[in-house]
Each structure stands twice: as C-alpha cells, then as structure tokens.
Image (cartoon, rainbow, N blue to C red):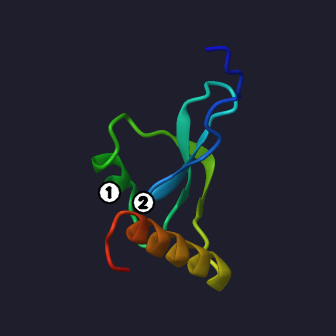
C-alpha cells in the first residue's frame, strides 16, 4: 500500500504497557499497572509474554488525563446513541 511507518510504538492495555524490543521489535512489557501480576498478564495475553530488562510500575494518570479520558468516553457514548 506504500505506507512507510515505524509501526506501533506503544501498546497500552488494562494490565500493562508494551513497547517494541529495540532489536527483535517484539512487543515486551515495560510497565505493569498497580496491583497487576505477571501471572495475570500471561493469562490474558495471546502470546508468550516477554519483559524488558527494566519493568516499572505504571504511574497513576493525572487529573487532566482522567478528565480528557472521561470526556472522550462521554463523547463516544453520545456518538453511539448511549446516554453518558
């Protein structure tokens, strides 16, 4: 199709943040959300999970980030005819 990009740079799930390994480009866990275990990630991922050498805990979102996410959620619900 002629599209030239470097591909996904981050995958954010309900459990963790994945980023491509610099060498293999395989998505690897770089940050685990608070209260989530490696076992939970493995049980909910469709491939054998790899972890970066340094895995941090995902920081909590700021009030501004939460506000933006809530507004996006509400706009999406309105666009689909749901009451928000």
Residue appearing at x 44%, y 66% in the figure? 76
Splitting the image into 4 quarters, where does residue 39 fall? bottom left
Can you identify the residue that label 2 sits on?
Answer: 15
Q: Residue 16 location in percent, x, y?
A: 48, 57
Residue appearing at x 33%, y 79% in the figure? 83
Splitting the image into 4 quarters, where does residue 13 fall? bottom left
**Residue 70 seen:** yes
Q: Residue extending furthest bottom?
A: 63
As rendered, which of 80 and 52 lies closer to the eye?
80
Using the numbered discs, state the Cα–Cα distance from disc 1 to disc 2 in whole angstroms.
8 Å
Q: Residue 35 location in percent, x, y?
A: 41, 72
User: The N terminus is located in which quarter?
Assistant: top right
Please rate how many residues cluster around mark 1, counting C-alpha atoms within 10 Å: few if below 14, some from 14 to 19, many from 20: few
Q: Residue extending furthest top?
A: 1
Q: Residue 19 location in percent, x, y?
A: 60, 43
Q: Is residue 42 left or right of residue 5?
A: left
Q: Residue 45 location in percent, x, y?
A: 35, 44
Q: Is residue 54 above or below residue 83?
A: above
As rendered, which of 65 and 84 lies closer to the eye?
84
Which numbered disc, 1 or 2, marks the residue closer to the eye?
2
Can you identify the residue that label 1 sits on?
Answer: 40
Mark 1 or 2, nearer chain start: 2
Q: Residue extending furthest left?
A: 43
Residue appearing at x 58%, y 66% in the figure? 58
Q: Secondary structure at mark 1?
A: helix
Find out whether the residues at labels 1 and 2 contact each other: C-beta distance under 8 Å: yes
Please rate how many residues cluster around mark 2, counting C-alpha atoms within 10 Å: few if below 14, some from 14 to 19, many from 20: many
As rendered, which of 51 and 27 lies closer to the eye?
27
Q: Secondary structure at mark 2?
A: loop
């Amino acid at each position: 199709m002629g599209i030239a990009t470097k591909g996904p740079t981050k995958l954010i799930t309900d459990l963790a943040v994945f980023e491509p390994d610099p060498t293999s480009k395989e998505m690897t866990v770089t940050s685990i959300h608070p209260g989530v275990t490696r076992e939970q990630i493995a049980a909910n991922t469709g491939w054998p999970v790899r972890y970066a050498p340094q895995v941090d805990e995902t920081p909590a979102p700021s009030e501004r980030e939460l506000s933006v996410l809530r507004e996006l959620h509400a706009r999406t619900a309105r666009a689909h005819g749901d009451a928000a």
